[in-house]
């Protein structure tokens, strides 16, 4: 370990190990339950078994026909990835203006962005649906049932948060580089693209991840704004959990298998992106 | 909000970076047009529906008037009067207290997780991915799993029984409230973790080196140097996490079912059941608006108090 | 009215005009279907997913060859999803053309007035009222003239019992009165074995017991515009229902946390005598458990608790009238096609085909007739014939909720011991108030 790395050490080793083990155990205990349940039979899970009396990997093959999981995952990936990119870029742009420029109403906008987060989704569902469907009725635009309709909704819901993440980040960012570029005659867009975006990559990745997960986990809006061919993974997944009136058994085992399968792409994406989470500011060379 | 007091102290003096109080925000050549795309979206998809929702809260909209909802009778504040009399305040109280508790508990967990994954070591990528799992599992899967584990004869009670403790009922009665808090903590702490992790990246290497030279202990370095960097982002995360907890519908719905036990009849459950099971849209919109106002007032008071404004601070570092 | 003209009119006149225009547009659609599409919303079948898909494809093909039109299927996961879908579609005047709606939601759907009321002409289009089992029409509308629901499939409730355990306890045939059921359950309870599995924490089960026992005692819970929940018959029903666990001790104490599927899971382990409320759909799950080959369906008791014969005003209700009705949306621009589609899937051969593929019981009388000879189905078909419809009022969803809520809020006390009559009475007072206020709002 280099001296610099040693200097950056935050916690003594024993504490670090203890905390890591504790946190992992806390996360993994219920996950173990999910894994075991996914290898159990539906009756076994419904009957409250922890350790399956018979192990079977059948659920992992059956789920592809029970619900249209592959379509769901593709749709979710497309919509959520677009949402993540768009909201991160738009959020950065908005945040940049809010941080660097003074104008009337700026404070109101900043507070309003937080305030928007307190609106419950259950209140918005019906009005948003009415609005989207009237776009179809009045303007001849089909919004309901399309991927981009869902994208617009998620983008908007993610935007206040993305903007705030970027506001907190950008306000700590030195402005020398920008100023230098501006004296050389660079336009705002160029400055954003060449300086602000690269320098704030860690925060952009974070806000992108959150925007992605917002769409990934939503069921409320997706269930009314999509059709079978544009259904998201979360909606497809929910089909497994349905308890039908009339005694049919929900397919617990497949649901657990399906949720592990659905979690996989997100975890992989995160692993791919996490290297960008490291040192954006210092890497910029503003020293 | 309890977290506030622990995070507020002004410990910024420890920062070695010279304070450059230079030109702050400028008023010249403001590229305000850059705000339009986001602004248009928010007006279209949030503000207009919100106005529509406000209007719905003032009409008698239920299954009988739904089809010709434009003609539904205007009844002014009647829905609001009824909502206050139908257990709404109780629900708001449960929601807010549950949300604050969950936030307070997730902050130390999230920060600890961020600290242990900050310095590189073999296998760190895996640990980071593990920490993310509760957050990427859909809410209703999390709720279903916990519901199954917390059954009267489930794995949790079986384990407790071996230790000689009677677990009792987790999903009904007074203890259901704590179940809700605990499961929410389990599912939501990675949010704080991710925010704290991102904030840790903004700590200059010089800061570490300066502390190393000074030879301070890890604890005082952490407390005096590192944590202040986390203050802003984590504070924001707390705020948003609390609001997310308040508005979490899927978790209580799947954990406890509808109708919910009185102890966990949180605001979104009440709104959802009124809206989509009793089909009283006007009343449920009024309930949502009342709770929105009840939450927004302290929220804005708080936002004023903590000066979320970035005007001066932005120029400070 | 041509569509383009309508759209122009709408664009000018705004939202109010839209609703009017859609309503006005109702009469004049063309019946040739080529190039058109109808949207159909049905429940997702997770027990037989591949079979359901195959069925959907085969119906779509047949419909295309008959009319030239396409069928697009949409599925919903839960009853709540379905209600949400109905509501958003009704509000916006767009969505599926044909809905398969659970029987207990039909009154709610009817009260929105967003579905086509079936006149003589409509019934003629789908092949006449006579083709359906008479009892299955019981929850199609408030009266003969105002029906919206076309019976599609039946899903009656039955009990299931463990043949081995009953024989071992010397019981030669399943109980036919609730008291007898309690007695049997007591005899069956010993060691780690329980007499009865009941899902006390299910979102839908509890009210079905209460309604059944009450109507058998002569109280249908709703009398015109009056709720009759604070009533001795209902009180007795709740006492019996709670008593199984708290005083008779014939139910596993863990049942206070069970949903219906968990109760089935428990029964499937083979250590329970009776499971009190299930349907033919459970067969697959039961055969996957330890009870394979050792279980049989039986009718739910039809004599109210505390009695040996049904009182004169009591109704022989073996089950709520349960299943799916088909509804055609009022806003549909393809009503003729929608009715042709409904005719197609309610005809005898299509209904038998559906039964063979998915195990859904036909509502078509001729199709049901051919199934009567099947001994496996005897009990289920009987239960379907003895099904009684729940009150047809837009307030029913609220009443159902109030009845279930009385159980939900009693669970903490139930886990500690018996619920006193006074406690029940106070819960019933709350439920009565909620039910009455829902009935008062009926328009």
Image: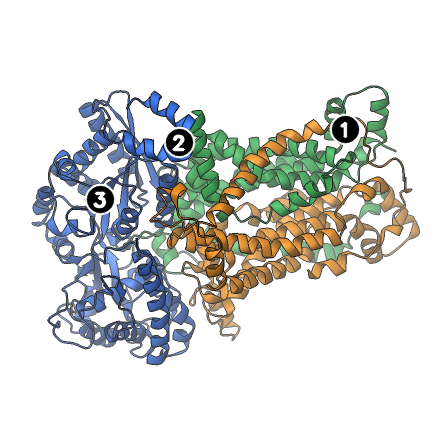
Chain colours: A green, B orange, C blue
The percent position of residue C15, horizontal first and vertical second, equals 41, 34
Q: Decide if residue C147 is on the left or right side of residue B314.
A: left
Q: Decide if residue B180 is on the left or right side of residue A134.
A: right
As rendered, which of A285 and B84 lies closer to the eye? B84
As rendered, which of C297 and C202 lies closer to the eye? C202
Give the Cα distance between marks 1 and 2.
Answer: 44 Å
Q: Secondary structure at mark 3?
A: loop
- Name the mark on residue C148: 3
As rendered, which of B67 and C204 lies closer to the eye? B67
- Give me the chain letter of mark 3: C
The percent position of residue C328, horizontal first and vertical second, equals 25, 38
- Name the mark on residue B30: 1
Q: Secondary structure at mark 2?
A: helix
As rendered, which of C347 and A271 lies closer to the eye? C347
From what the image shows, is residue C416 above or below residue A241?
below
- Name the mark on residue C256: none
Both on one chain, marks 3 and 1? no
The percent position of residue B46, horizontal first and vertical second, equals 55, 40
- Name the mark on residue A229: 2
Quadrant occupied by the N terminus of chain A: top right
Q: Decide if residue B304 is on the left or right side of residue B214.
A: left
């Amino acid at each position: 370990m280099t001296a610099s790395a040693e200097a950056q050490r935050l916690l003594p080793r024993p504490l670090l190990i203890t905390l890591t083990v504790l946190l992992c155990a806390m996360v993994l205990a219920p996950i173990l339950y999910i894994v075991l349940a996914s290898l159990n039979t539906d009756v076994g899970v419904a009957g409250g078994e922890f350790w399956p009396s018979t192990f079977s990997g059948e659920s992992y093959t059956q789920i592809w026909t029970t619900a249209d999981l592959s379509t769901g995952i593709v749709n979710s990936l497309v919509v959520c990835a677009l949402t993540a990119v768009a909201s991160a870029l738009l959020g950065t742009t908005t945040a940049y203006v809010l941080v660097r420029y003074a104008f009337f109403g700026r404070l109101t906008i900043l507070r309003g962005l937080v305030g928007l987060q307190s609106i419950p989704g259950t209140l918005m569902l019906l009005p948003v649906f009415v609005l989207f469907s009237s776009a179809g009725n009045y303007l001849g635009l089909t919004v309901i049932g399309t991927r981009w309709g869902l994208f617009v909704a998620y983008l908007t819901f993610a935007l206040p948060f993305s903007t705030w993440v970027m506001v907190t980040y950008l306000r700590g960012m030195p402005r020398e580089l920008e100023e230098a570029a501006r004296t050389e005659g660079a336009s705002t867009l160029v400055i954003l693209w060449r300086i602000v975006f690269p320098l704030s990559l860690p925060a952009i990745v974070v806000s992108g991840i959150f925007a992605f997960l917002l769409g990934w986990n939503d069921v409320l809006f997706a269930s009314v704004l999509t059709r079978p061919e544009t259904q998201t993974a979360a909606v497809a997944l929910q089909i497994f959990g349905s308890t039908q009136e009339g005694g049919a058994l929900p397919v617990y085992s497949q649901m657990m298998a399906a949720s592990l399968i659905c979690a996989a792409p997100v975890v992989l994406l995160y692993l791919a992106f996490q290297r960008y989470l490291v040192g954006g500011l210092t890497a910029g060379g503003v020293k | 909000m309890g977290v506030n007091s622990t995070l507020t102290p002004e410990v910024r003096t420890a920062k070695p970076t010279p304070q450059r109080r230079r030109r702050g925000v400028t008023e010249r050549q403001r590229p305000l047009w850059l705000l339009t795309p986001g602004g248009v979206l928010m007006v279209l998809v949030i503000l207009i529906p919100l106005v529509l929702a406000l209007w719905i809260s003032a009409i008698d909209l239920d299954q009988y008037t739904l089809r010709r909802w434009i003609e539904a009778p205007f009844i002014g504040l009647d829905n609001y009067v009824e909502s206050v009399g139908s257990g709404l305040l109780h629900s708001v109280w449960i929601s807010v207290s549950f949300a604050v508790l969950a936030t307070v508990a997730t902050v130390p967990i999230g920060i600890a997780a961020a600290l242990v994954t900050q310095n590189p070591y073999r296998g760190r990528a895996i640990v980071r991915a593990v920490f993310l799992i509760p957050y990427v599992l859909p809410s209703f899967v999390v709720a279903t799993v916990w519901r199954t584990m917390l059954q009267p004869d489930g794995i949790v009670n079986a384990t407790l029984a071996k230790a000689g403790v009677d677990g009792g009922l987790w999903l009904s009665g007074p203890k259901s409230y704590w179940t809700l808090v605990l499961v929410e903590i389990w599912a939501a702490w990675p949010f704080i973790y991710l925010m704290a992790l991102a904030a840790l990246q903004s700590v200059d290497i010089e800061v570490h080196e300066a502390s190393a030279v000074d030879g301070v202990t890890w604890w005082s370095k952490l407390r005096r140097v590192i944590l202040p960097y986390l203050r802003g982002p984590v504070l924001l995360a707390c705020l948003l996490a609390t609001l997310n907890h308040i508005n979490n519908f899927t978790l209580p719905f799947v954990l406890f079912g509808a109708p919910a036990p009185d102890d966990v009849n949180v605001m979104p459950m009440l709104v959802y059941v009124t809206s989509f099971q009793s089909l009283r849209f006007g009343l449920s919109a009024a309930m949502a608006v009342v709770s929105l106002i009840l939450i927004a007032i302290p929220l804005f008071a708080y936002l004023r108090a903590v000066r979320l404004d970035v005007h001066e601070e932005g120029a400070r570092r | 009215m041509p569509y383009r003209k309508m759209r122009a009119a709408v664009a000018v006149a705004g939202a109010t005009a839209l609703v009017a225009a859609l309503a006005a547009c109702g009469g004049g659609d063309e019946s040739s279907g080529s190039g058109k599409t109808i949207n159909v919303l049905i429940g997702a079948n997770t027990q037989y997913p591949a079979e359901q898909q195959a069925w959907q494809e085969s119906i779509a093909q047949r419909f295309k060859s008959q009319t030239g039109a396409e069928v697009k299927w949409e599925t919903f996961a839960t009853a709540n999803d379905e209600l949400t879908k109905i509501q958003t579609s009704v509000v916006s005047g767009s969505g599926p053309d044909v809905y398969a709606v659970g029987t207990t939601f039909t009154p709610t759907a009817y009260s929105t007035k967003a579905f086509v009321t079936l006149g003589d002409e409509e019934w003629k289009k789908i092949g006449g009222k006579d083709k359906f089992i008479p009892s299955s029409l019981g929850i199609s509308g408030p009266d003969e003239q105002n029906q919206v629901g076309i019976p599609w499939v039946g899903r009656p409730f039955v009990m299931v019992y463990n043949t081995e355990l009953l024989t071992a306890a010397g019981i030669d045939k399943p109980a036919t009165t609730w008291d007898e059921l309690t007695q049997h359950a007591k005899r069956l309870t010993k060691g780690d074995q329980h007499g009865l599995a009941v899902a006390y924490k299910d979102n839908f089960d509890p009210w079905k017991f209460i309604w059944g026992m009450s109507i058998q005692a002569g109280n249908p819970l709703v009398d015109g515009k009056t709720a009759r929940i604070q009533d001795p018959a209902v009180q007795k029903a709740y006492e019996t229902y709670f008593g199984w666990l708290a005083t008779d001790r014939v139910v596993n104490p863990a049942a206070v946390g069970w949903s219906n599927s968990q109760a089935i899971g428990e029964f499937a382990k083979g250590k329970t005598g009776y499971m009190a409320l299930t349907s033919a759909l459970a067969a697959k799950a039961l055969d996957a458990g330890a009870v394979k080959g050792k279980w049989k369906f039986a009718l739910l008791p039809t004599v109210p608790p505390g009695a040996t014969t049904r009182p004169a005003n009591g109704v022989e209700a073996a089950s709520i009238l349960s299943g799916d009705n088909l509804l055609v949306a009022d806003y549909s621009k393809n009503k003729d096609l929608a009715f042709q589609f409904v005719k197609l899937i309610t005809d005898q051969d299509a209904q038998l085909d559906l039964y063979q593929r998915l195990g859904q019981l036909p509502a078509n009388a001729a199709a049901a007739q051919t199934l009567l000879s099947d001994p496996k189905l005897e009990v289920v078909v009987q239960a379907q014939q003895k099904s009684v419809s729940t009150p047809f009022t837009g307030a029913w969803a609220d009443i159902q909720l109030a009845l279930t809520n009385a159980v939900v809020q009693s669970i903490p006390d139930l886990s500690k011991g018996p619920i006193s009559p006074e406690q029940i009475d106070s819960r019933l007072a709350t439920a009565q108030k909620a039910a009455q206020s829902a009935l008062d709002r009926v328009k």
